[in-house]
Amino acid sequence: MNANAEPASGTPRVVTSRSQLQEALAGASQPSAVVMTMGGLHSGHGALMELGRALVGPQGHLTATIFVNPLQFGANEDLAKYPRTFDDDLAICAANSVDLVFAPTPDVMYPNGDPEVTVDPGELGGQYEGVARPTHFSGVLTVVMKLLQLTHPTYAIFGEKDYQQLTLIRQMVRDLDIPVEIVAGPTVREASGLARSTRNNYLSEAARDTALRIPSAIAAGQSVSERGADAVVNVARSILEAPADVEVDVQYVVVTDPLMGPAPAAGEGRLIITAIVDGTRLLDNAQVFIGPPEPGAADADATSGVDTTE
């Protein structure tokens, strides 16, 4: 699509350069929202766009970015094979009322080559995902910072599925006084319960069946949460580590507090699981309440209206 052409009705305008982006945003209505993606879009991304549109209303402005960020891929990771499905991605953007798609190339995002100055993710960035992928979160936060500076949104929407990423982005915005509200979108799931992910496309049928142990482990962990965080971890891990037809490498199973600090003795926590299933790294997480439920908690859960099982 010609980046300078006026879009057809219902089709987002596509821009690929900084100057085109600035020109497009100069006349954009407010409030505004951005959904940052690497392409390979699916219904989980669509749900984030839908949330963005709800936040800004029919008269506000919604931008989606599509950029496969090389800074967040380490050696021997899947940068080369990461799906590039731009026409399909654009259709998903159109179906979810996106006004503008910014689809830069690496030389547009990093005109001087790999940046000398990057965002340090701090102590949390070296834990969990950061153990196996030590440069990952610096690359993520650097590109998010750059895209926030280029798009100046009122809201930026990120999915809860990548919970450590979401937590670090929130910390960056807080610590560096970035004037944007970070909004979390609930995890969207396939009918089977598997969390939606672009990397699900890498799974064979046998691997997909085995990967269903991850949501099963989460449900089992939640079911014993009254017995404490250790019980949650042990039950979840036992499901993941049972013999399987395909290789499962459990990277970590952990309960943290909502900010990814130590697990609470009682109260709200987060059960986070990462496992490599037949060579594909899969992440999932869910809220857990550790210890006996507080009076009225069941009623509050029943009326929360949040559905993360799509």
Image (spheres, helix red, strand yellow):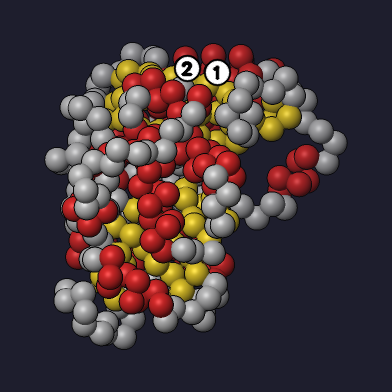
Q: Quadrant of residue 289?
A: top right
How dense is the environment of label 2, judged by Cα within 10 Å: few (below 14), some, or many (20 and up)? many
> Which residue occupies 38% across, 43% down?
142
> Which residue occupies 32% across, 70% down?
21
Residue 189: image x %, image y %? 43, 46
**Between residues 67 and 111, which one lies in front from this camera angle?**
111
Look at the picture and state if 10 lies above or below 292.
below
How dense is the environment of label 1, judged by Cα within 10 Å: few (below 14), some, or many (20 and up)? many
Residue 153: image x %, image y %? 49, 64
**Between residues 74 and 199, which one lies in front from this camera angle?**
74
- Left or right, 18 with reference to 151: left
Give the residue pinned by disc 1: 233
> Which residue occupies 34% across, 53% down?
37
**Between residues 166 and 281, which one lies in front from this camera angle?**
166
Quadrant containing the N terminus is bottom left
Give, as a three-letter code, the residue at label 1.
Val
Q: Quadrant of residue 134?
A: top left
**Between residues 18 and 157, which one lies in front from this camera angle?**
18
Look at the picture and state if 229 lies above or below 86.
above
Q: Is residue 191 visible?
A: no
Q: Quadrant of residue 54?
A: bottom right
- Left or right, 236 with reference to 137: right
Q: Is residue 189 visible?
A: yes
Residue 33: image x %, image y %? 48, 65
Give, as a three-letter code, the residue at label 2.
Arg
Q: Residue at the left extreme? A: 80
Dot 2: element: helix
Give the residue pinned by disc 2: 237
Dot 1: element: helix
